[in-house]
């Protein structure tokens, strides 16, 4: 029923959505490796934008990245 899986970074606490098949494997106790291609940035469970300059996750209301100042 539209189940989604998420992981939380241990270094900064950010939340990332991961593919369903990898989430199910983790839930079953399998030891898997996640790559950058597996991670989709989220903001409180919703998809978020990522700055193309510095890769910071940015809220939808911003027109410029609050970290590096690049236009989004």
Image: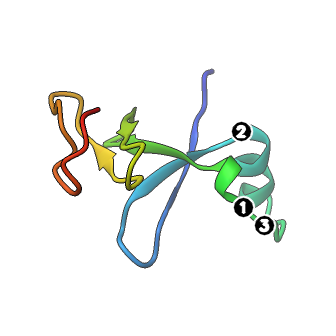
Q: Are marks 3 and 1 in contact (CB under 8 Å)?
A: yes
* Relative side of 67 to 18, left or right: left
Q: Residue at x 23, y 37 (%)?
A: 59
Q: Secondary structure at mark 2?
A: helix
Point out which mark residue 33 bears. 3
Q: Residue at x 76, y 49 (%)?
A: 22
* Relative side of 43 to 66, left or right: right
Point out which mark residue 34 bears. 1
Q: In the depicted view, which residue is nearer to us: 50 or 7?
A: 50
In terms of sequence position, does the residue under pointer 2 or pointer 1 come before the other? 2
Callout in the foreground (2, 3):
3
**Is 51 above or below relative to 29?**
above
Q: In the depicted view, which residue is nearer to us: 7 or 60?
A: 60
Q: CA distance from mark 3 to mark 1?
A: 4 Å
- The 10 Å Cα crowd at callout 1, few under 14, some 14 to 19, many 20 or more, is few
Image quadrant occupied by the C terminus: top left
* Relative side of 61 to 18, left or right: left
Q: Are marks 2 and 1 in contact (CB under 8 Å)?
A: no
Image quadrant occupied by the N terminus: top right
- The residue wearing badge 2 is 20
Callout in the foreground (2, 1):
1
Q: CA distance from mark 2 to mark 3?
A: 14 Å
Q: Residue at x 81, y 54 (%)?
A: 25
In terms of sequence position, does the residue under pointer 2 or pointer 3 come before the other? 2
Q: Secondary structure at mark 3?
A: loop
- The 10 Å Cα crowd at callout 2, few under 14, some 14 to 19, many 20 or more, is some
Q: CA distance from mark 2 to mark 1?
A: 12 Å
Query: Seen from this angle, which residue lies furthest bottom?
Result: 11
């Amino acid at each position: 029923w539209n189940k989604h899986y998420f992981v939380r970074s241990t270094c900064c606490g950010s939340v990332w959505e991961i593919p369903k098949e990898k989430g199910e494997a983790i839930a079953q106790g399998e030891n898997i490796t996640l790559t950058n291609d597996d991670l989709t940035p989220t903001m409180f469970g919703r998809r978020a934008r990522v700055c193309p300059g510095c890769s910071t996750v940015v809220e939808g209301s911003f027109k410029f990245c609050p970290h590096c100042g690049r236009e989004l």
